[in-house]
Image (cartoon, grey):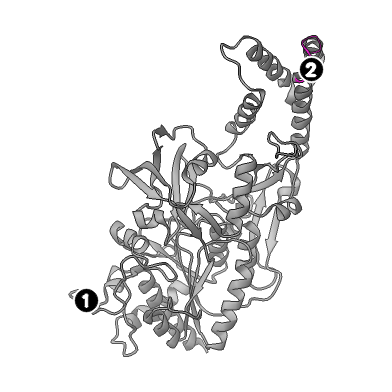
Amino acid sequence: MQSVMRKRLIGALRLESGLLLIGVALLSVTAYLLATMDQRARATERIKQTDYGEDYRFAGVMAEAFLQIQEKYVEEVAPKDLFEGALAGLFDALDPHSGYLGADNFKELEKNTEGEFSGIGIHIDVRDDVLTVISPIPGTPAARAGIRAWDRIIKIGEDSTEGMTTRDAVKRLTGPVGSSVGFVVYRESERRRIPFTVIRDRIVIENVYSNVDDGERVTPYFEHLLAERIGYARVTSFSENVSERLAKVFERMKDKEVEGLILDVRWNSGGLLTEGIKVSDLFLDEGKLIVATKGRLAEQNEEYRAKTSRKVDWPIVMLVNRGSASATEILAGALKDHKRAVLIGPEGENTYGKALVQTIAPLVASFEQDKDGNDLPNAIRLTTAKYYSPSNVGPEGKSIDGVGIEPDLTVKLSLQHTSDLLMKGMLLGDPSQEKPPELREEAKNENGDTSATAQGAERNGASDMELAVEREGLFYLKKKDERKAPETEDIQLRYGVDVLRALLIADNGKK
């Protein structure tokens, strides 16, 4: 779950007039609760006579219920607890992404934006009313333990997650480095419950890895790609400044005379809307539509377009999977719709399908104070709009929320292979738990084709790029290639490289 630091949240503040009215109503009730019993009686009468308007006429019911609980409930309950419960109830009537951020959660939100926090390393969401893993963060304790995207978390500790919000789940799953947390997932593909106990660790997320970075993490396979003038960039999150870092990577690739790009956004659960737009801008011509947002208020209806000329003009293959979500889907939708990239995903998988925009609105009042009596910062998170990819902006356009983006080409992958990528540190930049072989004999089928090519690609439509692959690329892929690179165990990446080689041949043929 990505977020922005408090100073940036203030700048992005959007307070709807309805929220202000609710705030007024709740402040009235607060004043009423602090009064004496006689004053309470008079306040109760005033509440009965007050016209809160069509939308807020039930505020008096809340105040009266509070009074009854305070006076008659079998045990004394702290007013703060009742108010926090009532506030949580407001958000229970909304979607799972909206909620109240108390002081602790708000502080954690700032840490996550900085790319470092303590926990097990998963992004979660409520999907179909069940707490669901969007994606484990590669290289983290959750990934090494074998957690998979779309695992359903049904129990944390001894408590069922039924009705549990994402904010409550995050609070339970995070904790000090070295502490452990137990939970149970239901894995639909295996039709079984699986218990896990994971040791929390310091989670540091670098948002960009590439084969032009210095250091030992660039393996021989990625070095060989660079020798072929193929750039590789893995974007792990859309946290702050990812667009700036990616732009610098592309400049270094230009120095290396790169001619094509593999853009890897698998298990990238998204982040900041602004960064998704800025990264898209790197690939598109000025004026091209990146994404549109539509909400109930006119101010939420916006179109975001590329502001500058494209910084990258290479053919692009983009690797996605069901763990690619939110801001990642903004980028994927823009590049696919403008024919700037071929999207390759696992067979039978779309991207995650989270197309909702949340606004973080810091609150003036707070339930909690520091030792000097000063209010601690808190906020609410509200879903204020849905976003639409360029091809879905018209009157008949549909949001991809709950659906995801369909890849252009697919490759067949086993579930075990997918787990191995996460568990064994096989993605560029991840710490290896079990060093994968960098070089191996290429697997052949009976026809002598490479295993990745033999699995083939399913056509979903016929874009110009796809036709180029079919017309010129597949013939090339089946030839004896004297420049063949050492193989990697990452089948989806290997297939993406094969497709990119085909695109480069097609592109060079047009020049």
Instruction: Answer whether residue 338 is magenta in the image.
Output: no
CB under 8 Å between discs 1 and 2: no
Span colored in magenta: 34-39
Name the residue furthest front.
Answer: 371
Residue assigned mark 1: 444
Q: Residues within 10 Å of mark 2 (few under 14, many from 20)?
A: few
Q: Residue at x 63, y 78 (%)?
A: 311
Q: Is residue 227 above or below residue 300?
A: below
Residue assigned mark 2: 35
Comparing labels 1 and 2, the label whose residue is closer to the camera: 2
Alpha carbons under labels 1 and 2: distance apart? 81 Å
Q: Residue 421: image x %, image y %? A: 35, 64
Kindly state the secondary structure of the residue where label 2 is placed.
Answer: loop
Q: Residue 76: image x %, image y %? A: 60, 16
Q: Is residue 260 above or below residue 121?
A: below
Q: Is residue 307 left or right of residue 421?
A: right
